[in-house]
Amino acid sequence: MNFDFSEEQVMLRDSVARYIQDDYDFDTRNKVVASDEGFSRENWQTFAELGWLSIPFAEENGGFGGSPVDLMLIMEQLGRGLIAEPFIPTVLLFGGLVEAAGSEAQKEALLPAVIGGELQGAFAYLERKTRFDLDAIETTATGSGDSYTLSGEKTVVFNGASADKLVVSALSDGGVSLFLVDASAGGVSRTSYRMMDGQVVANITLDGAAGELLGEAGKALPIIEQVVDNVTLAISAEAVGIMGRLNEVTVEYARTREQFGVAIGTFQALQHRMVDNFMAFEQAKSLLYRAICDRLEGKADARRSLHALKTMVDRSGKHIGAESIQLHGGMGVTEEMSVGHYARRLMMINTIFGNGDYHQQKFSELSYGEKAQEAPAAPRAVDAA
Amino acid sequence: MDTSFSAEDLAFRDEVREFFATEWNDEVIQGLSHPDTFREAMTAWHQKLYNKGWAAPNWPEEHGGPGWTSTQKYIFDYERAAAGAQSLMPFGLQMVGPVIFNFGNDEQKQRFLPKILEGTQWWCQGYSEPGAGSDLAALKTKAERDGDHYVINGAKIWTSYAQLADYIFCLVRTSSEGKKQEGISFLLIDMKSEGIKVNPIHTIDGHHTLNETEFNDVRVPVENLIGEENKGWTYAKALLAHERTGIANVSDSQRNLAQVVELASNEMQGGKPLIEDASFQRRVSDIEIELMALEYTELRVLASVATGGAPGPESSLLKIKGTEIQQAVQELRMEVAGYYQGVSVPEGGENLSGHDFGDYARYRYMYGRAATIYGGSNEVQKNIIAKAVLGLG
Ligand SMILES: Cc1cc2nc3c(=O)[nH]c(=O)nc-3n(C[C@H](O)[C@H](O)[C@H](O)COP(=O)(O)OP(=O)(O)OC[C@H]3O[C@@H](n4cnc5c(N)ncnc54)[C@H](O)[C@@H]3O)c2cc1C
Ligand SMILES: Cc1cc2nc3c(=O)[nH]c(=O)nc-3n(C[C@H](O)[C@H](O)[C@H](O)COP(=O)(O)OP(=O)(O)OC[C@H]3O[C@@H](n4cnc5c(N)ncnc54)[C@H](O)[C@@H]3O)c2cc1C
């Protein structure tokens, strides 16, 4: 039993941390976000050169063959730096789906370009009525074999405005299928706008747009769910990174801000609240480790751990975000301070692939509902072994 | 990162599981449930573990510890809790034992450690006083040197199980010069000494575990002093680290929560089992999710101890979260019991209500309030984290 990281993992983590320290301070980051695309293509090239874009991909696909632990370490740092570049949409979602569902030819055509930083991608899954149920979609694909056309409207597509290629979920062949669609193809129109964390997203209307089948027709749901699980772990790691950073920033502020002739950090009422924030962070981090180990080691409890994690990321994220603002007093509500920016990213993460209530409901179904009787949960790590 | 168990670990788990399945039986449970037979039954239970070499998982091998890895300790405690088996009395094994083997002299080690290990000598803790609770160093019970004896005068309070103990380990004041922490000594006192009087304190759960222990000119031989005079505070503080290991009580809470779920499956509300009620599920899962996290928080602390780190101030987090969770589970058990949460059987008396867990739910809940007070109250733990972890002055 150990929670140590290998030498390579420590190097990887430190390289991301150093980059943020040297090249991505808060002001720089805000300038990047304010640009038209909401991120910097130049930075993206740097990420490619540093090898970060290759981390999650298998070696046979030209990747680094990183484990969920490697990914966690990167994501935590990306959270701490509040990195705006579209790592999740291009690498984890688009790249992840191509790797999981694509044919050899599709992988060869797309993955090297993703890893090299030349291709931007997105996964268009959400629709007005989808909420958190990935199969609650109305976009349809008609056709067969090599030739499908898609119609429907996708919303809040992360990186949807900058993506060269999209993976689109649509109903066909009696189920959910995935399609590769050229973002510039005929029948595709995009409206872009910003979310509260500054990222640029798009609503994408498909009106008879040509799509190339990715994976088996009508059978994509399990693959989507698998990739979404990976990404849920990854954004949870990002959230944990943010929470840790928020706590540091807040404690530092409390140590230096003086009122009533003393640093406000000497007031016990505030100290105890910062301790609560510290505990919320440590608990979220523990569940992150748990969910990752369970997945890595193929434990029976992996699904429950993931639901538990996302639930806690929601609760702790909101708690720490709101408390950090409160402890900053009036300054906390200004754009000038970083706390509000971190809190907004946490609020965004909360809702991606299911909020706390959604995951807690799923957790309960698996733990105490009928499903619990079918496959009894292992409440203890010893039994899950 | 790796939390998988080796084949040896799993074999160990099976051995431990088997042990508890056979040895933790009705006879033991019966004996422990009545105050008149409690000590005898607890000693017998202790000796079953002692005979296996399992009484003191945290002791070094040279003093009779089993030499387990942290994973084995973790497995052992899991299996104990999962079987519903009680842990042994902590005062000798967890509290004074480590002080004796770390700071005592050879004569003291030989005199006390074997009896503590085999469970024949019972101890209680004499720290708190009416005027010295959270601010323990304010203690006033005085020890004055008279030849080769100390003469003790004063009173200790909240001394759990003093009525059953053979010895009490005490913090006493041997000097009032300098800082208040610097005039404190650590003494081992025979409870049969002349001048000791134990007065019971009855608690809100209806049971008797607490006492006030008075000392009137009690003569204690100087060879019962641990280490040096006026250094007792240092020894007591070092012991706190031991006291905190396992303080999160994760395995007991897991077992208790699983039991609550089971109880709630048999309790009907609105024509269906209570466990199917969405708002009840939400309350259970709130606790279980925190507990799943705490289990890993504890493993992280254990893992860092195993690689040479000391259980630092982070272990205050285990105390705070662990006790909050215990109380939350106790509250939930009360609610499952419905009306029967009010059943109040006198200690040692017969349960005439016909209900099997209402009385238990009640007294666990009521006594459970104390968990956030003793062992350093949760507010004091927050002060520790604020200062030592967050660096807030
Ligand atoms: C939206 C908004 C509108 C405002 N409008 C006006 C306006 O129109 N005119 C105007 O004059 N002002 C205005 N204010 C200012 C407002 O009154 C101050 O923000 C407020 O008094 C707090 O002071 P501060 O921001 O300096 O925070 P600080 O005093 O620095 O407080 C920081 C944190 O420390 C805590 N704290 C401070 N002292 C103690 C203590 N003794 N014990 C425990 N905790 C303590 C606070 O609760 C807070 O959480 C506005 C503020 C906001 C956010
Ligand atoms: C069931 C039980 C068993 C016990 N067993 C033993 C035993 O065997 N031996 C023994 O020596 N002692 C024992 N104790 C005593 C226990 O250690 C004390 O109760 C504890 O140290 C708190 O002291 P106090 O009760 O005097 O409360 P106080 O110190 O008076 O505290 C009252 C309240 O004030 C809060 N408070 C105090 N100081 C601060 C601060 N600086 N900042 C914020 N809040 C603060 C506390 O958290 C608490 O909520 C036992 C207690 C209980 C309840």
Image (cartoon, grey):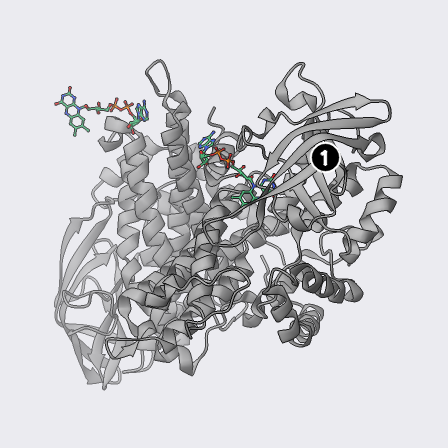
Question: Residue B117 lies in what quarter of the image?
Answer: bottom right
Q: Position of residue B152 (x, y in %)?
A: 72, 28
Q: Position of residue B28 (x, y in %)?
A: 65, 70
Residue at 15% x, 68% y is: A129
Query: Who is closer to the viewer here, A108 or B221?
Result: B221
Q: Position of residue B77 (x, y in %)?
A: 62, 61
Q: In the rendered image, is residue B29 in sight? A: yes
Q: Is residue A260 left or right of residue B308?
A: left
Of the 4 image quadrants, the one containing the N terminus of chain B is bottom right
Q: Is residue B58 left or right of residue B360?
A: right
Question: Residue B262 lies in what quarter of the image?
Answer: bottom left
Q: In the rendered image, is residue A232 in sight? A: no
Q: Is residue B1 left or right of residue A370?
A: right
Residue at 68% x, 68% y is: B9
The relative height of residue A70 versus residue A381 in the rendered view (above or below) is above
Query: Who is closer to the viewer here, A162 or B135?
Result: B135
Q: Is mark 1 within 8 Å of ligand 2?
A: no
Chain bearing mark 1: B
Which quarter holds ligand 1? top left
Query: Which residue matches tag 1?
Result: B195
Query: Who is closer to the viewer here, A342 or B320?
Result: B320
Q: Number of marks in the image? A: 1
Query: Who is closer to the viewer here, B28 or B155?
Result: B155
SS at badge 1: loop
Q: Is residue A239 left or right of residue A191?
A: right
**Amino acid, disc 1:** Gly
Q: Position of residue A15 (x, y in %)?
A: 51, 42
Neighbourhood count class around disc 1 (C-alpha, 10 Å): few under 14, some 14–19, many 20 upward: some
